[in-house]
Image (cartoon, rainbow, N blue to C red):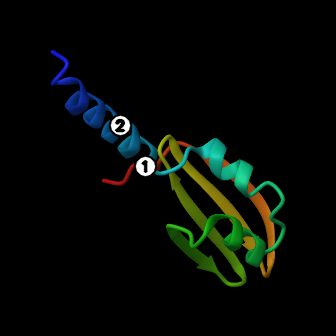
Amino acid sequence: MLRRFPAFAICLLTVFALTACGPPSKEDILAKAKDAKTRAQLETALGKPDDVSKLGSIEKWTYRAKNGQVVFILFGETVTIEAAGPSEKKD
């Protein structure tokens, strides 16, 4: 019985490590970006967005989370709106 304990402990640690490697939650993303008011600050806090869409000088930066997504609207260099919601379902 004691011979199996090290193998069980290694498997358990591996499961915990893999769980922590997934994408962050919406709450984690919003907390990291709380003080970001400019494009540079947002990118420093969160890294490159998962998706960027543009309409003139307005950009929508989308970050995927394990429980949905977080969207930031940028006008020029300024972060103007942030919203968190469920993942968009695409057919």
Q: In the rendering, which numbered label is found on residue 54?
A: none
* SS of the residue under disc 2: helix
Q: Which residue is mark 2?
A: 13
Q: Is residue 35 left or right of residue 11?
A: right
Residue 19: percent from the left, percent from the top? 40, 41
For badge 1, the amino acid type reads Gly
User: If you read the primary sequence from the N terminus, does the residue marked by circle 1 or circle 2 appear first?
Assistant: 2
Q: Nearer the viewer, residue 70 or 16?
A: 16
Q: Quadrant of the N terminus?
A: top left
Please tell me in which quadrant of the rendered image residue 38 appears: bottom right
Q: Vertical placement of 84 versus 49: above or below?
A: above
Measure the alpha-carbon separation of dots 1 and 2. 15 Å
Query: Where residue 61 sits in the image (x, y, percent)?
Result: 61, 67
Disc 1: which residue: 22
Give the vertical position of 45 relative to 58 (above or below). Answer: above
Question: Mark 1 near mark 2, Cβ–Cβ under 8 Å?
Answer: no
Residue 69 or residue 12, whichever sits in front: 12
